[in-house]
Amino acid sequence: MSEVIHKDNKKSLSKIVDDLTKPLKRHYGFTPWILFLTAIMALGIWAYIIQIRDGLGVTAMRDYVSWGLYIASFIFFIATALIGMLISAVLGLIGIKWITPIARIAEMIAIGFAMWAGLIIIFDMGRPDRVLNIFLHGRIQSPIVWDITVVTTYVAISLILYLLPLIPDIPFLKKTMTDQPKWKQKIYAVLSFGFKGHTEQYKLIKRLTRIMAILIIPVALAIHTVTSWLFALTLRVGWDSTIFGPYYVTGAFVTGGAAVLIAMFIFSRDFRLKEYITDFHFDKMGKLLVLLMLVYLYFNINEYLVPAYKMKTLDEHHLFGLFTGKFALMFWTVQLGGLIIPIILMLFKKMRRPTPSLIIGIAVVTGAFFKRYLITIPTLLHPHLPIQNVPAEFSTYWPTAFEWSITMMAVAGAVLIITILAKLFPIMPIWEIAHEEGITNEEINKFVEEKNN
Amino acid sequence: MKHILKPRKTTFIFILLILSFSVNAQWNIPDYAKNTKLPTEPTYKLTETGKQLFIKNCIQCHGLPGEGKNNTAINAPDLGTADYQSKHNAGQFYYQFNEGMGFMPSFKDKLNKDDKWSITFYVKSFDKGFKITGEKIKAENCVIDFKTEDSARTLIATANIIDKNGISKPAEGVEINFFVKRIFGNLPIGETVITDQNGTAVFKFPDNIPGDENGKIKIIAKFKDSDAYGTAMKSAELNWGTHLHFVNPVLERTLWGPNNRVPLWLLLSFLIVTGSVWLTIFYVVFQITQIKKAGK
């Protein structure tokens, strides 16, 4: 179907190249945006310096709640990063065409959020200078070591999966970005890896991309399953669950899918790419998100209904805390506003149009963030071995301004990485879009040569 | 715990008070009691026996004499006060505790005559005018020892009292306990043994006490009544324990062990999975450098 739409209004190669490289040169609102992100990060860095100076006591974390906002954010970041695998690998490998203009966006989100996920773990450490000890003395039996291994691996694969389809775009950049600073052109020269548009080279890149796309599927499943195991391999109420792996993975797809919707809206408006990211793409992405949310809802029902039906003594305290207790407001807001209402709304075609999609996307992402909070904190407030005569502050938790500032720095940092990538390289693969428009390699090579002269 | 018991305790005392008012009786000690002849000479040895009997039978209501831990709710007096002692001589005390009245039970049929007199002597020992003869046992003059009869796993303990001339005499009727040294304190084993007129007592050591890898065990003998005989003790290392076959779980390959003792299945899985993934990554990275070649 997508091909029919494209063939109706065929775009010329020069128009495609022009449309996709213009945003790299035009900087409306770029400086204030960067200043805004930098300001948030500066605040976060200041908060982090204080945290290093005074210790983790500046956070609200105490003996009971030892995993607070940082670890909740860590799961959220890993979750958001997982969408890169679903869109560019799973959908790409089964040959779905409409993902071409959004695959790279998903990959950018994956890189930005996966990198900062690793940093958030370090923010959670009281002695970050000892982080190297995890590699020197880490125990292979510990899920923390598995987690560090898969996060590193996932960042590496995501980077390669981002860079590989970028290589055939470099000749376009080399020719059109001649008015840009020298350092940028140097980056392009390095990243071209001597690509000249030969059929053999296209074949090799496609083959390597395919290998990486296959490889990223188990690794991405591993990264979030292991993250869930950090919780599920303990005997804590609310974490001691056998479905935590798939529960996290589907939850991650929901978060990432909603994040992609937000990014699609911003890029199609700000970069003036409405012709490439059309209502059709929003509609498809919306449908995909509904499917993902339904699966996630199914896991939610399993995760809460099954223990609630049995109501074991230990579970009881935890579950009533969520359903009717202290966390009830947050719990039901997240479940209704972040999952059930979005599912119902997105069943209607009108709600899958760009603007409603953006609003629903924001609701789902916000809900997803607080869902991680609800997974992490309430369990820790019910310790297995209660300490006697604890200070009152141990049994409550609400993040301090320091924690919020540092978490916001991580969000701003991930967005900054996405922004920088979007400003350095086209956010869609020019060559793939050209191929879909029926433009041959010879035509592309000829175009690149022409410009050269 | 304290605050849970309190209401019950108060009710109990309250009921006792009502009862004591309703009983409202007076001791009526006949005159002849005052002139009762003592059956034997009070000796230190007898007061010691009396003390043990007092602890068993009387301490709940009266407390130890002179310590003021008596139960006033039922009018049980502290028997060590000068006031009590001046009003009751040995015969009067004997009468009281033999007959009983109100809350004070009668001990007529509960204890034999010798024991009752031992208690009487013990209580009267708090009266400065009451004469006690015999040798006062001083804790620091008691020694304990034991030897072993290896074949039968038998311990022969001896208790001796050293008098002021430095001559050791066997102590009769002394209770001795045996212990085995454990990591946290001493583990009492077997029953208490009592020395005979030769000051010796035979103890059969059980054969199922765990020792170390060589069956080694540290045995300790002590006086049961350390107040009277002191804390003297004798210990010896014997290989009478069962041999311990201790497999240190920390030295096995376990999930909770250190990194150099990771279970092999886990190590292999980890290495194979991460190894094959990273080999693929390196392969792809290497192939990227071959793009230039492919264009020639």
Image (cartoon, coloured by chain):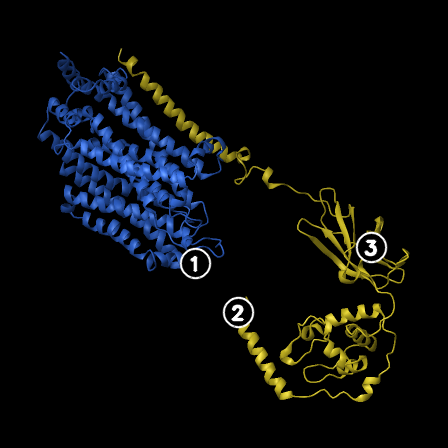
Chain colours: A blue, B yellow
Of the pair A163 and B164, the residue shown nearer to us: B164
User: Are the numbered discs 1 and 2 placed on the same chain, yes or no?
Assistant: no
User: Are the numbered discs 3 and 2 placed on the same chain, yes or no?
Assistant: yes
> Where's the C terminus of chain A, which quadrant?
top left
- Give the label on residue B4, or none: 2
Name the spot of residue B220 as percent of width and height, x first.
76, 52
Q: At 72% across and 47% down in the image, what residue appears? A: B211
Q: Examine the rendered structure and indicate whether residue B287 appears above or below residue A224.
A: above
Q: Amino acid at mark 1?
A: Lys
Q: At 31% across and 28% down in the image, what residue appears? A: A159
Viewed as shown, does residue A290 lie left or right of B232? left
Q: Nearer the viewer, mark 1 or mark 3?
A: 3
Asked whether residue A318 is in view, the answer is yes
Name the spot of residue B284 as percent of width and height, x first.
34, 22
Mark 1–mark 2 Cα distance, whole angstroms, equals 29 Å
Q: Amino acid at mark 2?
A: Ile
